[in-house]
Image (tube, rainbow, N blue to C red):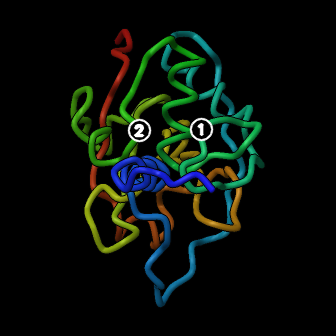
């Protein structure tokens, strides 16, 4: 029987538990997430809008902790990294905290399709991320047992947990 080096096993576990700020489970909330919203109409007029459209192509993809592709499923940061890489050729970090430091901060009232929106869903700032689609909606990979879906930014659940937004791709105007 082959024995593995303990450092190899520790390193493997660290990588496997990566994903959304390296925490694989959700802290039980007293309030469930709201129902999914309908996607807005997006016209791909720039790279950021193309990212939003790329994200919509993955509606219904199952959630998977540390998931990085439509074939295996996505976690929240895996969806963002995949969509930006495939839709705009931009490589992004693989966890929400590092994502929250990339690009430029954006005021909520100035959000544009393709901007990243951050939430505190695990009693920790920047523990969840989605991609803004326009018309007060965003797309994300919600949690274990869920699937990629669209949400309304104005739902009380998301308003109370909002941490801010970042613009990765500058858009004209």
Circle 1: element type: strand
**Residue 40 % position (x, y):** 66, 39
Horizontal arrangement in the rendering, residue 73 relative to residue 122 (left or right): right
**Residue designated by label 2:** 94
Is 101 drawn above or below residue 86 in the view shown?
below
**Residue designated by label 1:** 68
Q: Residue at x 51, y 23 (%)?
A: 84
**Residue 80 % position (x, y):** 50, 36
**Residue 88 % position (x, y):** 52, 13
Q: Residue at x 35, y 47 (%)?
A: 96
Quarter assignment of residue 23: bottom left
Horizontal arrangement in the rendering, residue 47 relative to residue 162 (left or right): right
Q: Residue at x 52, y 10 (%)?
A: 46
Is 151 drawn above or below residue 103 in the view shown?
below
Residue 133 in sight in this render: yes
- Asked whether the beta carbons under mark 2 and mark 1 sit within 8 Å of each other, the answer is yes
Lower sequence index among marks 2 and 1: 1
């Amino acid at each position: 029987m082959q024995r593995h080096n303990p450092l190899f096993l520790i390193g493997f576990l660290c990588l496997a538990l990566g994903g959304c700020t390296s925490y694989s489970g959700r802290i039980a909330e007293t309030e469930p997430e709201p129902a999914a919203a309908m996607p807005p109409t997006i016209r791909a007029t720039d790279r950021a809008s193309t990212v939003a459209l790329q994200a919509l192509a993955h509606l219904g993809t199952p959630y998977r902790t540390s998931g990085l592709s439509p074939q295996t499923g996505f976690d929240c940061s895996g969806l963002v990294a995949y969509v930006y890489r495939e839709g705009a050729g931009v490589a992004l970090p693989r966890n929400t905290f590092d994502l929250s430091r990339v690009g430029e901060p954006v005021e909520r009232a100035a959000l544009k399709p393709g901007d990243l929106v951050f939430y505190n869903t695990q009693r920790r700032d920047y523990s969840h991320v989605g991609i803004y689609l326009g018309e007060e909606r965003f797309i994300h990979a919600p949690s274990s047992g869920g699937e990629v879906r669209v949400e309304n930014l104005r739902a009380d659940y998301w308003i109370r947990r909002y941490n801010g937004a970042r613009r990765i791709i500058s858009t004209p105007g």
